[in-house]
Amino acid sequence: MNKKDYIIRLEEKKDYREVENLVRESFWNVYRPGCSEHYVIHTLRDDEAFIPELDFVMEKDGVLIGQNMFMKTIIEADDGRVVDVLTMGPIGITPELKRKGYGKAILDYSLEKATKMGFGAVLFEGNIDFYGKSGFDYACKFGIRYHDLPEGADASFFLCKELIPGYLDGITGVYQTPQGYYVSDEDVEAFDKAFPPKEKLKLPGQIF
Ligand SMILES: CC(C)(COP(=O)(O)OP(=O)(O)OC[C@H]1O[C@@H](n2cnc3c(N)ncnc32)[C@H](O)[C@@H]1OP(=O)(O)O)[C@@H](O)C(=O)NCCC(=O)NCCS
């Protein structure tokens, strides 16, 4: 990746459909046959937990090649406190440009912006092989548990990064995924019909 060959800027209304198509291309057949993330992003923009100041696109040669966004959520602490945190995603890079450093570039840029806005920590589901390079660690190391996960179950998918060092010191508790991320298969199907046809494939490595 040439460091100067892209810009990162806030998403604008005029970008919405292009971004949804980008997200669809990026996630298609990765975690399941087809994907739901393009519909998720479509609905999240209208959610009160959505943060427009942290809704970024990456542009190269006038074409959108990546995006990332954040939502507000909470940790329900074991001592009764409610701790405000961020969650993140979808984050996606156009398929032709994956594994060239663009994902890390938009991730690090957006984390820096979130830090400047004063947010304390980011938690979400992801692959440590990618996010570990940007300072994420397993959330269990911070004493934070994933909602609805049976005790002893593998939680290595659940990651955390403090944006304010020590923000989660002295806190144990349960992280809650914002409701906006849950969409029905029927709604995804209906939304997907407005996009060009794509073949859904069952592939090794998919988790759903
Ligand atoms: C995940 C994603 C955003 C990463 O962006 P990217 O531009 O492809 O990643 P980068 O080139 O910046 O990766 C930096 C490093 O992270 C690691 N990494 C990135 N993607 C990885 C993956 N899928 N598995 C393992 N390690 C990965 C690698 O070490 C990589 O360096 P390398 O290519 O020199 O080995 C992008 O691949 C994508 O859009 N994937 C599909 C959608 C998705 O899964 N989104 C994330 C959901 S949590």
Image: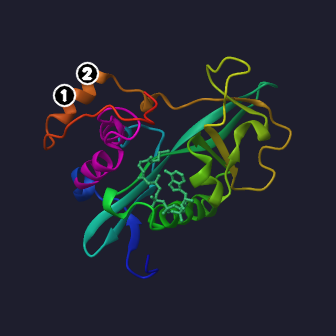
Q: Which amino acid type corresponds to the residue marked 2 in the rendered image?
A: Glu
Q: Can residue 118 be spotted in the picture? A: no
Q: Which residue sits at x=48%, y=67%?
A: 101
> Which residue is the site of mark 1?
190
> Which residue is the site of mark 2?
186
Does 109 lie within the magenta span? Answer: no
Q: Secondary structure at mark 2?
A: helix
As drawn, the residue found furthest toward the right would be 170
Q: Position of residue 75 (x, y in %)?
A: 67, 33
Q: Which residue sits at x=78%, y=40%?
A: 141
Query: Which disc, if any, is residue 79?
Result: none
Q: Position of residue 145 (x, y in %)?
A: 70, 29
199 or 193, which lies in front?
Answer: 199
Q: Which amino acid type corresponds to the residue marked 1 in the rendered image?
A: Ala
The quarter holding residue 24 reads: top left
Q: Secondary structure at mark 1?
A: helix
Query: How many numbered callouts?
Result: 2
Does 21 lie within the magenta span? Answer: yes
Q: In this picture, which residue range is highlighted in magenta?
A: 18-43
Q: Quadrant of the C terminus?
A: top left
Instruction: Report whether 122 appears left or right of 107.
Output: right
Instruction: Report whether 128 appears left or right of 65.
Output: right
Q: Is mark 2 within 8 Å of ligand 1?
A: no
